[in-house]
Image (spheres, helix red, strand yellow):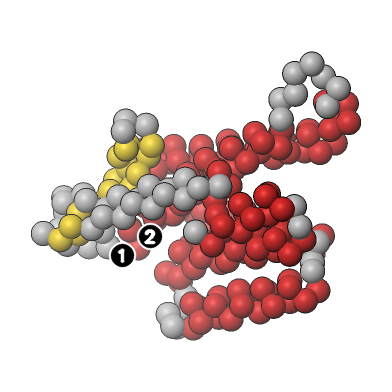
Amino acid sequence: MILAIGSMLYHATLQHMQQQGDETPMVWEMLLYMYILYSPDWHYRSTMPTFLFFYGAGFAIVHALVRLRMGFKVHYVMLCLLCVPRMYKYYIHTKDASAKRLAKLYLATILTGSLCWLFDRLFCPNISRWYFNPEGHALWHVLMGFNSYFANTFLMFCRAQQLGWNPEVAHFMGFFPVCENSETENPVTGAAAKQNGMIFFSFSPHLEADIWFWQINKQ
């Protein structure tokens, strides 16, 4: 929600301070992804969230005082790259075909969205004179919205597996992929799941709207 509000404020004002309100939560989101991806292998469980919390708070202070520009972009790309190997590890170890499809959709949307953004950035003066403007920057936001949605759903699937649940991918309204917890026996723990009916539904902050639906029904 913080990222959604920051993104709306920035695009409504196009001011540098509001831009930081959009960029800083983007880093916080990547730190959350890193926690989900790397926490199973962290020896001291309490130190990782503590470290990530202070790292995120420190970055927010530095970014507010120094007003990083290119530094933010480099930093954000580095955080994304740190997540790639672990996401690939989860992808190759996941047997669920629907979960693998989420990872593929994540990759497809981020590549297509990046091309739209780059094309609009490099050729904006020429494109603005066309009879029909494809609005590459707007397409970037839409595609990155779905990109974040696919990433969140896939990481929810991974996190549910880490917690010993037995997740599966269903489709809300027959279209939107969601992560649900099955009542069947967990193949890893050999025990039945204690929670079921877990649903996560989110439009990305890049679409300037967040809808969270989280429902856990205990047996």
Q: Secondary structure at mark 1?
A: loop
Tag 2 residue = 159
What percent of the width, then of the height, locates residue 128?
83, 27
**Who is closer to the viewer here, 22 or 14?**
14
The answer to whether residue 206 is above or below residue 71 is above
| Residue assigned mark 1 | 163
Is 32 situated left or right of 65 in this image?
A: left
Give the amino acid at mark 1.
Leu
Quadrant in the picture for residue 190: bottom left
- Residue at 61%, 52% (x, y): give it: 8
In space, the residues marked 1 and 2 are separated at their CA atoms by 6 Å
Instruction: Report the quarter where the C terminus lies.
Output: bottom left
Residue ID at (49%, 77%):
49
Rendering quarter of residue 68: bottom right
Q: Is residue 94 visible?
A: no
User: Mark 2: which amino acid?
Assistant: Arg
SS assignment at label 2? helix
**Are the two marked residues, 1 and 2, in contact with CB atoms closer than 8 angstroms?**
yes
